[in-house]
Amino acid sequence: MPTLIRLITPRQLSESYDNISFETMDIFSEAFKAIEYDVVLTTLFLHHFKEKELVSFLKPVIEKAKLGVVVNDLHRHRLAYYLFKLLCTTIKNQTIIEDGLTSVLRGFKRNELEDISEKINATYQIQWKWAFRFQWILMRK
């Protein structure tokens, strides 16, 4: 009999905290510009944007966030690409394979994160994390 895995969402984990909310919206919309927030968390999301779009998103967000922005995103690295290609030998879904390989290719190099941090006038910390990820913490200068 197959094992069932029950996923618990951040929203479910935060139900007893009335000061935490989660919103889904277009980050370039007027509705997004109007909201107030303490921290912005982006996970495996920013690598989908070109640098110009990233700067236009992050610059006002850094200025508005009370605490800052926490980014968890891909590290573009040759080894990550080839390890994922090896993993793909066990994956049947071609969409997953193509999306995964494209995402690795669109990931970030440390110097790119540093350059973007300077362009948006942010104080930053960058730490490499297992599975070819960067944790990039941004705060207003």
Image: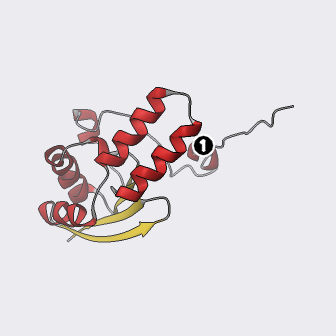
Q: Badge 1 is on which residue? A: 9
The answer to whether residue 130 of the structure is visible from this angle is yes
Q: Nearer the viewer, residue 4 or 58?
A: 4
Q: Nearer the viewer, residue 90 or 106?
A: 90
Q: In the displayed structure, does residue 116 sit left or right of residue 65?
A: left
Q: Secondary structure at mark 1?
A: loop
Q: Quarter of the image containing the C terminus?
A: bottom left
Amino acid type of the residue that numbered disc 1 sits on in the rendered structure: Thr
Colour scheme shown:
secondary structure
Q: In the displayed structure, does residue 121 sit left or right of residue 44?
A: left
> Which residue is depicted at the point 59% across and 52% down?
17
> Which residue is depicted at the point 32% across and 72% down?
125
> Which residue is depicted at the point 57% across and 47% down?
10
> Which residue is depicted at the point 19% across and 44% down?
50
Q: Position of residue 23 (x, y in %)?
A: 42, 38
Q: Which residue ends up furthest to the right in the rendered image? A: 1
**Residue 80 sits above or below residue 85 on the image:** below
Q: Position of residue 11 (x, y in %)?
A: 57, 43
Q: Position of residue 135 (x, y in %)?
A: 40, 63
The answer to whether residue 21 of the structure is visible from this angle is no
